Amino acid sequence: MSTPKQEHRGDNDVEYSEKAEQVVIHDDKFAEEHFNETGLHESDAALANAPWKYKVIALVTALMLPVGSHFSGAALGAMKASLKANLNIDNTRYGVLSSSVSIINTIFPILGGFFIDVFGTVWGTIVINMMIMLGSLLTAVAARVGSFPLMVVGQVVFGIGSGLIVTMQESLLSKWFRTKYLALAIGLQLSISRLSTFLGTLVSNPIAVRMNDWVWAFWLALILCGFSIIMNLIYAYVLHHLQGAIVTKTEIMRIKANKTVHARSVLKFPGYFWHIILIEFLFAAVWTVHQSVATELVQIHFGTTQVLAAYKASVSQVVPIVATPVLGFIMDFFGHRILILMLSAIFFIISCGLLGWTMVEPIVGMILYSFSLAFGPITMITSIGMILPSSYIGSGLGLFKGANNIGSSILDIVVGIVQDNTANQRYTGVMAVFIALGGLGLLIIVGLWFTQHIYLKDLLEVGRKKREQRMAELNDNELYLTKQGMDSLSSRKTTYLNYVYCGIYIFWGIVAWVLFFVFAATGKVSF
């Protein structure tokens, strides 16, 4: 039962939200008074109440933040043959180079997510984009001088940054669009990410041929990393203008005084959050590993050439580029996130069945897989943006991204073991593993529907009108707590189950590292 003071506070916060949507700022003095009144400079929750002219600029610049990172990462894979020839390395050493990016990101996205919750989106993204550019620079220099050790160092630096920038990008988009059009924003983000990766794969070799220099693929990646930094600075300027002198010492002290974020509050994250993390752990693993083996799968099972197999496998990248923004629009208006996640699991299982045991045209199976890849991530990312307080979205998405890399790292090795122990190294055993994990994931998704129905009153399923009303109430309550210098999770209690959830997460993280060193570092399983 709410007290009169709480009721009065809720009314005021709704008024704050309306002012943030309607007021047009004409001069700096008025802007300062306006932001002091609405609290826009005090809290991540207040970004959701910012005027739309700022939101649009924030969206455009935020979408460009990891373009250089995605292009650079794809260029490394596309230039594998040139790397092996010019650095005089074999497949095992290339595997070390490639895996040095993924295994490091079982940890750093978690730290990066907490970093952005504590220090904000500006400093976090600028520091990380500079790290990405440094890693790209070291990689390009290593390619020029022919140094494999230097390239490994460059990829480690790049890997830390590339793993963090996506977490930060999803976090800041969730903070800006939490109450309205979050799914559309995340859909655009996933689409741009896929497009950047696709272009990195498509353009790298032709640009190397055109310039008559294989290193030019890495120089182009470096240039695009510089473009991302420029977009980052524009975003910082917008936030500076919105919040007022965010980079000054006075503002930093004000943020620290008003913003309360504790690492131990992760132990207060609700059970349905960890439910989503478990689903991501399973499906991110099968999606990622399926993509990495797709070309060879088509080549072996369907008896095609490597070139034709690569062409047919690449179809799986096309649908998410087009479908995720459309899907985001649908979810923003009609909801049904869990239903869409169920469809993602079903599409994946059918895809594996067709590709593993039938001779149906492989493009059909790849398109079904592509729909699974388009439907799944957007539902989980936007759900986390809704169920966690704004001040902890970065930490939540960091755990989400960490689960992604933990699951992928483990399954990468498991799939290698299964294939090595299957007759003629065919993919029937691997596809059986995929179907088993997909079926288990589908059952867990059904469980999530019941969980959110009971504890969230169908927040993840309701349509636009009801969702926006409830999200506005949650956001205003968090804004009030922030103004009082209180933790937005202060009302939640830590239970023994929270320790169990965190313990299981840490356990699988350790398993991933142990498997990496036992198999990858010793060369017992090739990647």
Image (tube, helix red, strand yellow):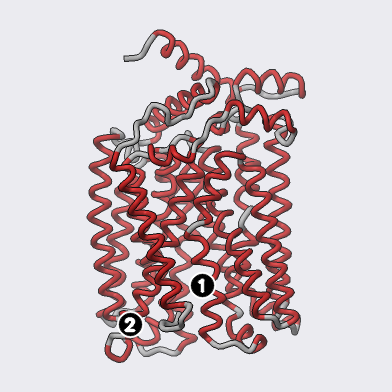
Give percent across and percent down for residue 243. Answer: 67, 30
Residue displayed at 27% across by 79% down: 429
Q: Secondary structure at mark 1?
A: helix
Residue 54 position in % (x across, y down): 65, 35
Query: Which residue bears the numbered disc 1?
Result: 99
The quarter of the image holding the N terminus is top left
Tell me how far mark 2 sits from mark 1, CA to CA. 19 Å
Horizontal placement of 413 versus 428: left or right? right
Say if 459 sits above or below 229 in the image: above
Vertical side of 183 occupied by 166: above or below:
below
Q: Disc 2 residue type?
A: Gln
Q: Is residue 504 above or below residue 286?
A: above
Number of other residues with Cα within 10 Å of mark 2, as a class: few under 14, some 14 to 19, many 20 or more: some
Left or right of residue 220, residue 316 in this image: left
Residue 165 image-quadrant placement: bottom right
Q: Quadrant of the C terminus?
A: bottom left
What secondary structure is marked by label 2? helix
Kindly indicate the quadrant of the structure image that contains residue 7.
top left
Numbered tag placed on residue 4 in the rendering: none
Q: Work out whether mark 2 precedes mark 1 in sequence or the reverse, and give the earlier one.
A: 1
Against 258, residue 306 (above or below) is below
- 404 and 299: which one is in front? 404
**Image mark for residue 419:** 2
